[in-house]
Image (cartoon, coloured by chain):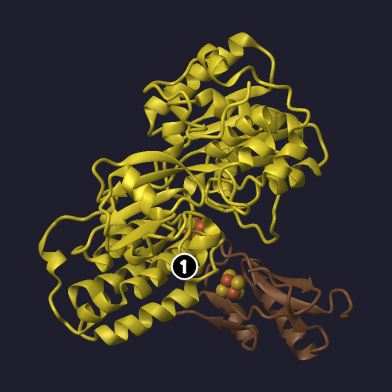
Amino acid sequence: MMRDVTLPRVMWGASGRPLTLREHEMTFGAAKAGAALAGELEASGLMGRGGANFTTSKKVELLRAQRGHHKVLVVNAMEGEPVGHKDRTLLSTNPHLALDGAQYLAALIGARRVAVCVSRKDSAIVHHVQRALHERERRGGGPEFILHTPPWRYVAGEESALVHWLNDNETMPQYRPQRPHVLHVGRSPALVVNAETCAHVGLINRFGAHWFRELGTPSSPGSALVSVSGAVRRPTVLEVALGTPLRSILREAGADPDPLALLTGGYGGAWLDGEHLDAAYSNESLQPLGATVGAGILVVVPRGACGLAETQRIVKWMANESSRQCGPCAFGLPALAEDLGALLHGARDPHGVLVRLKERCSVIQGRGACRHPDGVVRLVASALTVFARHIEDHVSGSPCEALTTPRRWVAVPALEHESELVWE
Amino acid sequence: MTRRSDHFVLRVDPILCDGFGHCHELAPELVQVDEWGYPIIHDQATSTSELALLKSARLAVRGCPRQALRIERVTSHSETPR
Ligand code: SF4
Ligand code: SF4
């Protein structure tokens, strides 16, 4: 059976509840052995959908080159982004597709164990995955699947933090001087793959690289899940072909057609000015504009909102989510949040604050063990460009309309321990 | 064509480093400190023929109470990832 090239792909068969193994096989056809996968995977040009923008086949090759029979495949469905819902949506629709992909990848790198990581906060998703794994266990064959449920934190889904959890029950990133770096669970080399990426692998193995590339652009092939929220009728997860104009994605999501700006990629992503709606949704077209596909997130912020206020809330939350292992991140991010707050609510010397904020951004950049601070710096830097005129108003002391209303557009979880933020 | 490993960079493990800044005192040419006291390391590769710099880098490595510093040999100026 050859699925035609239309969307949806990984969301095919969506029925409001997870497909059982039998339904899954009736929808997608039985799983193949996966012998030809290495070539097909490379030819497909699949990029990881977790946000790091890394070619999956390269990661796989790196792991294939490792010696030993005790490799581990880690499926990352932690979804640390508070405004991201794609992996959860996928696992509550087609859990077996992601597990198929994981099984192929495990066979490809020679792993006998697959660790599926879902945050324990999402009890429904944990339940869906558990059921799917039981079904596979009854069927027999394939690698040994183990479900892990780390606590939910922003950085817990960072791959080295996830591996750290599997080793020592600590959700903190590790320092990796050499890149690319091979992570290890115990002494076994580990490959960490995002859940959506696994689902695409499950399809590539069935229908081939050629089929996969019929959607998307030459350098960003295939389809991707996007979580759209903010000024929309209802927050949704859509599956779109990469390279689709942003305007049509917003239309499909029922979003404000003429927004002030879009938050792209996630909390560690970047703002995109609302005038660039004709840009295609792919990294090669968004990167020149300073934006990114990242973890498949779009938040629509309408005109009349205050971009500075939105940024400040995100940065404050992100500062609190630092694992506080590295000085520049533990002290730098609260300092950025503080500067943004000072700009927002008025400071004695707003020009000085703006200059200091820019300096701090360049000082912090690249000095953490993981990319958490770099994401925040990118967000702040993009806010300073996209909202430059509005920030100028704040600096010169003119009142900001949006501050008088409590309405904010980017959903930010409440801080658990507000007082912890100043950490000394 | 440059010879292999004729340059070096000083690298810090930000997780181990606790920001007391001894490295800045031992190798001020290579290490600045930020406002919180954590080292900002000159990330351009330095030629190993600059013996004075190499020596202070070694002093910093030895003097770091957390053993967070390392000298990494690199081939040329261009190859300094991060
Ligand atoms: S950079 Fe920040 S989040 Fe990453 S390991 Fe260091 S302290 Fe933790
Ligand atoms: S001497 Fe070591 S621990 Fe102290 S600031 Fe320098 S690198 Fe960090």
Quarter of the displayed picture in which ligand 2 can be seen: bottom right
Residue farthest toward the top in the current orientation of the protein: A138
Q: Which residue is drawn at 47% across and 33% down?
A: A8
Occupied quadrant, residue A317: bottom left
Image quarter in which the C terminus of chain A is found:
bottom left
Q: Position of residue A157 (x, y in %)?
A: 50, 45
Does residue A303 appear left or right of residue A38 in this picture?
left
Which chain is painted in brown? Answer: B
Which chain is painted in yellow? Answer: A
Image quarter in which the N terminus of chain A is found:
top right
What chain does badge 1 belong to?
A
Whether residue A111 is visible to the viewer of this picture, yes or no, is no
Residue denoted by label 1: A290
**Front in this rendered view, residue A80 or A97:** A97
Q: Position of residue A268 (x, y in %)?
A: 44, 58
Number of numbered discs: 1
Q: Where is residue B32 in the image (x, y as percent from the top left)?
A: 56, 83
Query: Tag 1: residue type?
Result: Gly
Occupied quadrant, residue A206: top right
Question: In the image, is residue A102 above or below residue A30?
Answer: below
Mark 1 is surrounded, within 10 Å at the Cα level, by few (under 14), some (14 to 19) or many (20 or more) other residues, namely many
Task: Tell whether circle 1 marks a residue whose Cβ is less than 8 angstroms from ligand 1.
Answer: no
Q: Residue at x 78, y 28 (%)?
A: A35
Q: Position of residue A355 (x, y in %)?
A: 36, 84
Does residue B76 appear left or right of residue A126 in this picture?
right
Q: Is mark 1 on a helix, strand or loop?
A: loop
Question: In the image, is residue A135 above or below residue B51?
Answer: above
Q: Residue at x 28, y 86 (%)?
A: A351
Whether residue B22 is visible to the viewer of this picture, yes or no, is yes
